[in-house]
Image (cartoon, grey):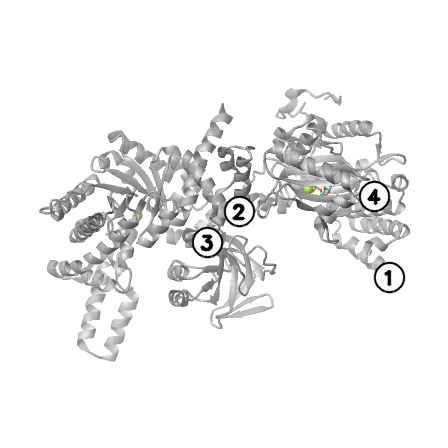
């Protein structure tokens, strides 16, 4: 390989390792080359290109890192020669020589991954300072103290980062020296003190390295580049990559750049700034600086930085140039920038720019403002916010100004903030929550039995379990804040204490959870309400113009239906009727119906239930007037409405021993008998759904009558009910055909003689593999399909959710057997394949068959993308996820366009 600086454009392709081009001078790169130059490198090259002052330098590509990683750390043969050649060019351009006794060149060595990644190697500054160059640097700066300070800082960074000398070794020596001199600040040490410290640091380095600290800057450079390569695979970086879904194949680049010094006295400075306020999104000056300081001093917090505005007084020219540069950069990138700068003797240099990280509410404000300012269009604005950010804004959040220190930190398992009194069992949580108390359920780990407690609590804190643990999954599904796997907490359920470090909290003490960060605080922190503000509404409104999928909500009550409509739901995709029975007032009638010995007794119990159902439906039809409501007929097995088998058996036993009233005992025994009879080995696959309806046709008949009466009553009041009746758990076309006859006959009977008409449709859930495979047969009898992807996941994969989530599923996710919990985000190939097959087969018979999805997947962005691609008509999800679904449905289209473009 030639070492000539001339670049061959075709050499971008690094696949041919032999003659790959591993080095780019800053002037050769640009922002589009991020995959090769890393984010930092590509952006400094871009700044150079558009005429913004950046210190000169070069970038070692990610391809070099990948090659080295592939070969156990061994560099590509030409790389070291290439680096030396690039260095020679840099020396030539700057008129300086690395580490020389006259005009020394000093550089920084900065790692830079494609996606910005904390956890990688720390930057090394001042490389090139040596016994030879230190005097020259001192003369240039007219400050030997500055030069010796730079030297000791260099050894500290280099020793720690490259040679793994523990940081405290140097810190301790520095502290000891200050103590000896009777001073408290680093700045009070003299040039001679620092010179002595350099000698001490060298000795300490040797002791810990077992060899001499290399003094040749070229050798230091070689080892530094190598350390960056190795840092790509260090455990810290690995953890971060896994958490953020970053591929380990990307590699990191290494940037070598000439040093500029913000610590050359009062006409020098260093700072960071944002082109807008990253907390609020407001367009205003936002930044900090320090005079006579270097690099990380601003963020390290040793000295308190000053607000950027004050720089106007201190360094007016550099300040005005910076303001102009900020404007230019934001316009150039079309997004808010996060910028690092340094002023060396009044001259401004930019050291980094990138799209600034921002809070969720700032993301919306900035995206909307950029559209208003004509910088980006609406489609681009939709690409600038993420579904997770919508999620955050839909929950109450901790006031960002809280300033409190967390007691501990667990996993941020389900976003939002919760304030409440600590309770240690689900029953107490349920009882107190229902009574209106704000409680936080604290458990070692939750189990399916805890569900009622979870519902009634403000939030959940667990000591154990990961992001896919039961508590996490359930909490996310319900929009409940949850901090899971907070391994530092100790729970004593008997003593009812929660111990975190030295803090002991008792039953009834108040804590605050931040499910968005995983932090746990003592006491009640101030909350701010969900921020569905104008920015949010506007951007989700733009999504509506782009999306093709309809978005409905799952709602079982008038109240939920109202909320869903406010969130923009275009109907109800799933109204579960069984929830209407699960309250104390109605359960007795339902139990009488189930326990009835004969049809008459059953009929009279059903007659009691009918008006209750009717009033529920009325509320829902009213709230959704003009929009479709899909009512699902009774689905769960009957034993779910009866007392628990074991409890009832114990009751019978107790009554037998006590020998009390015979009638009471008889009744209890009778109930026990029924429970026995109805209890199934495998209720999920037992007598439920359409099977139950066909065995006890009086139940669906009652439900259909209630639906018809409710619809007529609502219409009477001027409403416009749009009724869709849905049959659950159909496997055979015959099942649906019979139900359809029953429904049609019942409706006709209700209407007969009244002269009224009612338009309604009859459809079915597709939630069994057989139904998907035989969807063409089933479609003959259906006006619509709705994929029940929760049951379809259970039956399709052959796992029961409660058993899987409580046992092997978390391990499956951790071990990468499955990419994630298939109940949260659909199993794209398997269960998604069944959805695709069922849709195709159904539509092969009825071309315009309406097809939707109901269940948790309907609110999951990745699943929504698949449903959009398959060509479904709508998704249905819980009310508070409706805005997310509207947004994700638009993103599915925009991302699809992008993919087409990149394939073209
Ligand atoms: P990080 O990714 O941790 O911000 P950087 O590579 O950006 O790491 O560098 C850390 C600090 O050092 C930053 O404040 C940066 O501005 C400063 N820095 C990096 N290179 C130089 C340089 N050539 N001259 C002066 N300061 C530099
Ligand atoms: Mg930086
Ligand atoms: Mg189901």
- Upstream in the sequence, badge 4 or badge 2? 4
**Residue mark closest to the camera, 2 vs 1:** 2
- Residue at image position (19%, 63%) is 592
- Upstream in the sequence, badge 1 or badge 4? 1
The answer for how far apart the CA atoms under marks 3 and 2 are is 24 Å
Which label belongs to residue 472?
3
The answer for how far apart the CA atoms under marks 3 and 4 are is 52 Å
Which label belongs to residue 264?
4
* The N terminus sits in image quarter: top right
The answer for how far apart the CA atoms under marks 2 and 1 are is 49 Å
- Other residues around mark 2 within 10 Å, as few (<14) / some (14–19) / many (≥20): many
The answer for how far apart the CA atoms under marks 1 and 4 are is 25 Å
> What residue sits right under mark 2 in the picture?
361
- Other residues around mark 3 within 10 Å, as few (<14) / some (14–19) / many (≥20): many
Residue 609 x/y as whole percent: 20, 59
Which label belongs to residue 182?
1
């Amino acid at each position: 390989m030639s070492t000539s600086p001339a670049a061959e454009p075709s050499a971008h392709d690094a696949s041919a390792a032999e003659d790959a081009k591993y080095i780019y001078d800053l002037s050769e790169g640009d922002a589009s080359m991020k995959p090769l130059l890393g984010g930092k490198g590509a952006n400094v090259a871009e700044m150079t290109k558009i005429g913004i002052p950046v210190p000169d330098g070069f970038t070692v590509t990610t391809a070099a890192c990948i090659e080295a990683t592939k070969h156990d750390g061994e560099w590509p043969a030409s790389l070291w020669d290439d680096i030396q050649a690039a260095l020679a060019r840099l020396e030539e351009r700057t008129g300086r020589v690395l580490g020389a006794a006259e005009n020394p060149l000093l550089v920084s060595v900065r790692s830079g991954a494609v996606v910005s990644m904390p956890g990688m190697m720390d930057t090394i500054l001042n490389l090139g300072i040596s016994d030879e160059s230190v005097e020259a640097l001192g003369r240039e700066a007219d400050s030997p103290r500055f030069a010796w300070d730079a030297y000791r800082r260099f050894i500290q960074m280099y020793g720690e980062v490259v040679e793994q000398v523990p940081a405290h070794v140097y810190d301790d020596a520095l502290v000891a020296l200050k103590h000896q001199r009777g001073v408290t600040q680093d700045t009070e040490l003299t040039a001679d003190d620092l010179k002595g410290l350099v000698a001490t640091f060298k000795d300490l380095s040797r002791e810990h390295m077992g060899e001499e600290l290399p003094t040749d800057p070229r050798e230091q450079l070689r080892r530094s580049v190598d350390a960056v390569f190795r840092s790509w695979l260090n455990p810290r970086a690995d953890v971060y990559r896994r958490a953020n879904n970053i591929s380990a194949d990307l590699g990191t680049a290494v940037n070598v750049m000439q040093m500029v010094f913000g610590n050359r006295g009062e006409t020098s400075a260093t700072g960071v700034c944002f082109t807008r306020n990253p907390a609020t999104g407001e367009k205003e000056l936002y930044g900090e600086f320090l005079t006579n300081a270097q690099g990380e001093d601003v963020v390290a917090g040793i000295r308190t930085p000053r607000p950027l505005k004050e720089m106007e007084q201190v360094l007016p020219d550099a300040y005005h140039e910076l303001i102009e540069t900020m404007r230019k950069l934001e316009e150039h990138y079309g997004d808010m920038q996060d910028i690092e700068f340094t002023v060396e003797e009044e001259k401004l240099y930019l050291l980094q720019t990138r799209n600034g990280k921002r809070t969720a509410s700032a993301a919306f404000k900035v995206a909307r403002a950029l559209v208003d300012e004509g910088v980006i269009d609406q489609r681009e604005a939709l690409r600038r916010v993420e579904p997770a950010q919508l999620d955050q804004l839909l929950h109450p959040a901790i006031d960002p100004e809280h300033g409190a220190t967390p007691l501990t930190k667990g996993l941020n398992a389900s976003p939002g903030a919760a304030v409440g009194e600590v309770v240690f069992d689900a029953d107490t949580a349920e009882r107190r929550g229902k009574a209106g108390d704000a409680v936080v359920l604290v458990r070692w780990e939750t189990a399916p039995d805890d569900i009622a407690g979870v519902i009634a609590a403000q939030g959940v804190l667990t000591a154990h379990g990961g992001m896919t643990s039961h508590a996490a999954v359930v909490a996310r599904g319900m929009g409940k804040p949850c901090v899971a796997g907070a391994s530092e907490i100790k729970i004593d359920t008997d003593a009812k204490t929660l111990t975190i470090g030295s803090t002991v909290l008792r039953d009834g003490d108040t804590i605050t959870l931040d499910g968005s960060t995983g932090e746990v605080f003592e006491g009640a922190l101030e909350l701010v309400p969900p921020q569905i503000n104008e920015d949010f509404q506007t951007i989700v409104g733009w999504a509506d113009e782009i999306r093709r999928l309809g978005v409905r909500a799952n709602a079982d009550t008038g109240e939920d239906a109202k909320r869903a409509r406010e969130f923009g739901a275009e109907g109800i995709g799933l109204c579960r009727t069984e929830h209407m029975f699960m309250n104390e007032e109605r359960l007795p009638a339902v139990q009488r119906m189930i326990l009835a010995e004969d049809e008459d007794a059953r009929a009279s119990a059903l007659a009691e239930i009918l008006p209750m159902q009717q009033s529920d439906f009325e509320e829902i039809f009213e709230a959704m007037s003009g929009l479709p409501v899909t009512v699902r007929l009774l689905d769960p097995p009957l034993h779910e409405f009866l007392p628990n088998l074991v409890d009832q058996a114990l009751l019978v036993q107790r009554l037998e021993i006590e020998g009390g009233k015979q009638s009471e005992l008889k009744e209890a025994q009778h109930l026990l008998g029924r429970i026995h009879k109805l209890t199934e080995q495998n209720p999920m696959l037992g007598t439920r759904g359409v099977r139950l309806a066909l065995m006890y046709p009086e139940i669906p008949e009652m439900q259909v009558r209630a639906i018809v009466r409710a619809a007529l009553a609502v219409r009477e009041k001027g409403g416009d009910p749009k009724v869709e009746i849905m049959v659950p758990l159909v496997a055979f076309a015959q099942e649906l055909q019979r139900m359809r006859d029953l429904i049609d006959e019942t409706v006709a009977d209700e209407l007969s003689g009244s002269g009224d008409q009612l338009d309604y449709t009859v459809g079915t859930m597709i939630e069994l593999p057989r139904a998907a495979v035989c969807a063409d047969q089933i479609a003959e009898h259906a006006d619509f399909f709705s994929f029940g992807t929760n049951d379809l996941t259970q039956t399709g994969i052959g796992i029961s959710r409660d058993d899987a989530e409580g046992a092997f599923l978390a391990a499956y996710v951790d071990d990468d057997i499955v990419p994630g919990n298939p109940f949260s985000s659909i199993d794209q190939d398997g269960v998604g394949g069944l959805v695709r097959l069922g849709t195709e087969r159904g539509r092969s018979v009825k071309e315009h068959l309406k097809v939707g999805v109901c269940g948790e997947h309907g609110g999951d962005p990745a699943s929504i993308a698949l449903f959009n691609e398959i060509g479904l008509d709508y998704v249905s999800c819980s009310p508070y996820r409706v805005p997310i679904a509207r947004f994700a449905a638009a993103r599915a289209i925009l991302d699809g366009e992008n993919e087409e473009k990149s394939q073209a």
